[in-house]
Amino acid sequence: MSGAGTLRLDDREAVLAHAFRLVLEAWRTFDRARPGQPELEDRHRRLLAAPLPEAPADPRTVLDQAADVLDVSMSQARPRFFAYVGSSGLEIGVLGDALVASHDVNVATSAGGADLVEAQTVAWVADFVGFGRPADGLLAPGGTIANLTALAAARERAVPGVRHTGATGRPMALYCSREAHYSIRRAAEVLGIGGRQVRALDVGPDRRMDVGACAAAIEADRRAGVVPVAVVATAGTTLTGAVDDLAGLADVCARLGVWLHVDGAYGLPAAATALAGARFAGLDRADSATVDAHKWLYVPKACSVLLVRDPAALEATFSHQEDYIPHVGMEELHPVDRTLEYSRPLRALKLWLAFRVHGAAAIRTAIERNLEQALVLAALVDAAPGFTRLHDPQLSAVCFRLDPPAGADPAAHNAALARAVERDGRILLAPAELDGVPCLRACIVNHRTTDEDVRAIVEVVADVARRTAS
Ligand SMILES: Cc1ncc(COP(=O)(O)O)c(C=O)c1O
C-alpha cells in the first residue's frame, strides 16, 4: 500500500526485508539442480489474466505472487540450464542492480562518479580479456546492440558522413563466418548496408572462418565498387564455440585497411584463461570487440561491454548538438554522444561489484572450470553408446547426436529427442542444427554448474532416448 498522496511504501523496512527473503529463497533454489521444471498452474493463469488493478494491494502479497510466477518461469540461473548461451544472475550483481535501480542514475549526461565507474569497468574488462591499449568503450544492453554500435562506427569510418547523407547509392559490405550470430545481419539491415551485403564466408573443418576467402571477398568487392565496412570475427560462435583466427584476420584488415570487429559476446571472457587464452591471439589488434558480461562474466542481464580502440570513432558516429543537451565545446561531449541510447542505466555497477567482491582471479577460475567441464562432457559423449560428438570443443559448447533406432531418420530422431528432453525438464538443452541437421547442444557458462550436473546431461539424454524408443 502507498502512503497518502505519495507512492512511498508504507512499511518499507518490512517490505524490504520480505523482498530480500524472497531473493534469498530464490538463490537457495539455484544452489542445486531441482528435479524438473514446474508447470504453470491455474492460479498463475488467473493472476496473469486479471485486469488493470485500480485499488492498492499489500506489497508482500504481490511480491509473493511475482516470486511464484518467476519460480515456474525458465531461469537461466539454474545449474542445469545448458541451452543457448545462458547467464547466471551472480548474487553480487543482483544486489548491484537493486542499488542502481534505487539511485536510477542516468549515464546519458555526465553523472558524476557513475561515469567513472563505467570507464573503470570498461578498462578492467579490456585488461581482463587482453584487448590491449589504448582501450575505451561503453556499456550496452546486449551483444546485439554492442555489435550494432561498433558496426555503425565502422560504417562512418568507411564512408565518412554516411550518417548524414545515407548510403546514396554506394554499396557496402560486411564479412563474417557463416556461423556468425544473426545480430551481424541485423546490424547490416538496420544500418542500411543490407542483409544481403553480409558476406557469410565458409568455415573450415574447425568451424573457423576461411581467412583467405575473407581477403578474396574484400578484394573482389573493392574491384566491383563495393565499400568494405568491417570484418566481423567471431570469438566463440554461438553454435559450437569456434574462435576465428583473429591474428590472421587482423593481418587481412591491416593490409586492406578494413575495420576489425570481434564479436566475443559469448566467448571473449575465456581469453582471460590459461586454458583457452592462446585461441584469442590477435585480439589486441582489433578496432572493437563485444563482450557480454551477462553471459560468461556471470552477472545478470542486461550487461554487454563494447570495447573500442578509438573513442573518436564513436563520437564521429553518434555525437549530437541539441538545445536540450548542449555541449560546452567539443571536448565536453556527454556519454550520450557515444551511444545509440539516450536514457541509460549504470549497467557497469554489477560488473564493477563482481570484480571488486570476487576478484578477477576467482572469475577466471570459474571460467576455466566451465572450459574443463566441456572437456568432461566431450569425453562422456565419446564414451556413451549411440552418441556422436560433432566437433572438438574450443570453448564450452558441445554439439552431439544420437543414433536413431534401426530404419529411423537421424534428423527427425534428433529433433524429436531435443523436444523430448525439453519436455522432460531435468536439464535444459537447446535444440540446434549443425550443417542443417538437427542435433543437441549444451553450453556451459554457469558458475553454479557442478561436474555432477554435467554428467546429468548424458544420463538424462540417454534415459529420455530409452523411454522414447520404448
Ligand atoms: C556470438 C554472439 N553474438 C551476439 C549475441 C547476441 O547477444 P545478446 O543476446 O546479448 O544481444 C550472442 C547471443 O547469444 C552471441 O552468442
Image (tube, rainbow, N blue to C red):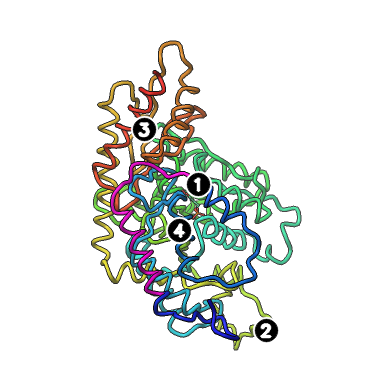
Residue type, mark 2 in image: Tyr
Q: How many residues crowd around disc 1 within 10 Å: few (fewer than 14), some, or many (20 or more)?
A: few
Q: Secondary structure at mark 1?
A: loop
Amino acid type at image mark 4: Ala
User: Which tag, 4 or 3, sits closer to the chain's start?
Assistant: 4
In terms of depth relative to the viewer, which is nearer, 97 or 330?
Answer: 97
Q: Position of residue 398 (x, y in %)?
A: 36, 37
Q: CB at mark 4 closer than 8 A to ligand 1? A: no
Judging by the rendered image, the residue that carries numbered circle 4 is 289
Mark 3: few/some/many CA within 10 Å (<14, 14-19, 20+): some
Residue 391: mark in rendering: 3
Crowding near the residue tagged with mark 4, few <14, some 14–19, many ≥20 C-alpha atoms within 10 Å: many
Q: Which residue is mark 1?
A: 41
Regarding mark 3 in the picture, which secondary structure is present there? loop
- Locate residue 361, reporting x and y percent: 24, 62
Of labels 2 and 3, earlier in sequence is 2
Which mark is first along the chain, 3 or 1?
1
User: In this rendering, which labeled residue sits more in front, label 2 or label 1?
Assistant: 1
Between 235 and 9, the residue placed more toward the observer is 9
Name of the residue lying farthest toward the top? 407
- Give the extent of the magenta segment: 16-41
Q: Secondary structure at mark 4?
A: strand
Is residue 383 visible to the viewer in this orientation of the structure? yes
Task: Answer whether residue 17 is magenta in the image.
Answer: yes
Q: Amino acid at mark 1?
A: Glu
Badge 1 or badge 4: first in the primary sequence: 1
Instruction: Kindly check if marks 2 and 3 are in contact, taking CB atoms under 8 A apart as contact.
Output: no
